[in-house]
Amino acid sequence: MKNRILFLMIATVAMFRVNAQNKDTKVVLITLDGFRWQELFTGADSLLIDNKDYVHEPEMLKKAFWRDTPSERREALLPFFWSQVVKMGQIHGNRKLESKVDLTNSMWFSYPGYNEILTGTADDKNIRSNDKIPNPNTTVLELYNNAAEGKGKVAAFGSWDVFPSIVNEERSGVPVNAGFESATGNLNEREKFLNQLQNQIPSPWGSVRLDAFTHHYALEHMKKEHPRLVFISYGETDDFAHDGDYQAYLKSAHNTDGLIKDVWEFTQKDDFYKDQTVFLITTDHGRGTEPLDTWRSHGKDIKGAGSVWMIAFGKNVDPKGEVKEEKQLYSNQIAPTILKILGIPVPKEIEGKPMKL
């Protein structure tokens, strides 16, 4: 009887300790739109880097990103991922090593991909285009914002102007700054300058702003408001790929690696986030490889466009490094994993299962 009481006491203390840890934990979810697993794990593509159909300054690009081995090339392209993140977290999706991450939706383009990432369930019936239709599904951002501990502590930032619909900003109450939206509310001087600058620097695209604006709007909000759950979606890689500009695609990926390092370093200097934050990074879809020109495209008719990748690092994440074993993960596991990290029950309607990090 005494042993049973002692066991219950230990179990109760352990439960309270876990709950306390969850209440202190924050999550930063980041996506790089349409960035291929091939470049993540092997760096610049030998078939593209000096191909004049896709690169206008091949010698300059090769000097920046070409190296003798795939491991050297990937570190030249993504130095933060491959010199720091690999030592403190997990990098999944190198299919050459049988580590696989796949979409469960069959559309293989952006809105269905982001819906799957953010809700934990693919919805091929309702999410069949990139049209600005308010998402009928509930995202992890909305679920956490509806919880007592998360109310008013969630924010989303995206370069693509469809995110207010994907998050269903009006219904969810989650503030979304996306597309060419300016910062609003009680602005600091840096946000006022960003608003002015965004109006003065044209984007190459009609629905996607340059990632630097998304990044700095997010960072300023984190400094001021300290949200517990932040979603940041960088978009340039996908649009430069659609443009067939491999040079800009690589340079943008390299720049985004630096932006993510910037967010990480901020969290490690800020008392609210330091040693209490988990980073999850992924992409909404892959791209083609064969025929060669399909690197520009994705969608259900493009072979390989459903193959993605996933990165995790931060508080309590096992530092496995690059996963080099046969393992299958899915994009629909991200949302329930976030809920588990934050100590929120996973609704039974969510199809994905939490990952063990």
Image (tube, grey):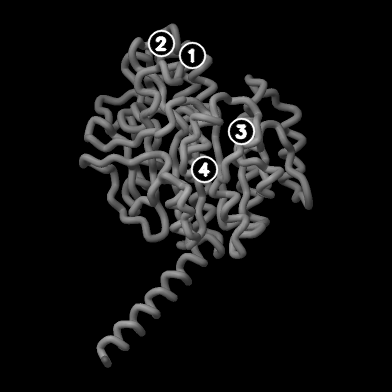
Instruction: Please state which amino acid type lies under the numbered disc 4.
Output: Leu
Neighbour class for label 3 at 10 Å: few (<14), some, many (≥20)?
A: many
Q: Secondary structure at mark 2?
A: helix
C-alpha span from label 1 to label 4: 28 Å
Residue at 45%, 17% in the rendered image: 297
The quadrant holding residue 3 is: bottom left
**Which of the 4 image quadrants contains residue 278?**
bottom left
Quadrant location of the C terminus in the rendered image: bottom left
Looking at the image, is mark 3 or mark 4 nearer the viewer? 4
The numbered mark at residue 293 is: 2
Quadrant in the picture for the N terminus:
bottom left
Between discs 1 and 4, the one toward the N terminus? 4
Question: Quick check: marks 3 and 1 in contact, CB under 8 Å?
Answer: no
Give percent across and percent down for residue 227.
61, 56
Q: How many C-alpha atoms fall within 10 Å of the one at disc 2: few (<14), some, or many (≥20)?
A: few
Separation of residues labelled 3 and 4 (CA atoms): 16 Å
Please provide percent x and percent y for residue 247: 46, 19
Give the amino acid type for the residue marked by disc 1 in the picture.
Gly
| Vertical position of residue 85 compared to residue 285: above or below | below
Which of label 1 and label 2 is nearer to you?
2
Q: Which label belongs to residue 244?
A: 1
Closer to the chain start, of discs 1 and 2, is 1
Q: Residue furthest top?
A: 53
Which residue, given by chain and number where applicable, does mark 4 sit on? 118
Q: Assess whether mark 4 and mark 1 are in contact (beta carbons under 8 angstroms).
A: no
Task: Name the residue rendered at 63%, 20% in the picture.
Answer: 204
Foreground of the two, 203 or 239: 239
Depth order, front residue of 66/342: 342
Residue drawn at 48 percent across, 59 percent down = 345
Q: Secondary structure at mark 4?
A: helix
Which secondary structure lies at badge 1? Answer: loop
Q: Give the side of residue 110 with respect to residue 36, left or right.
A: right
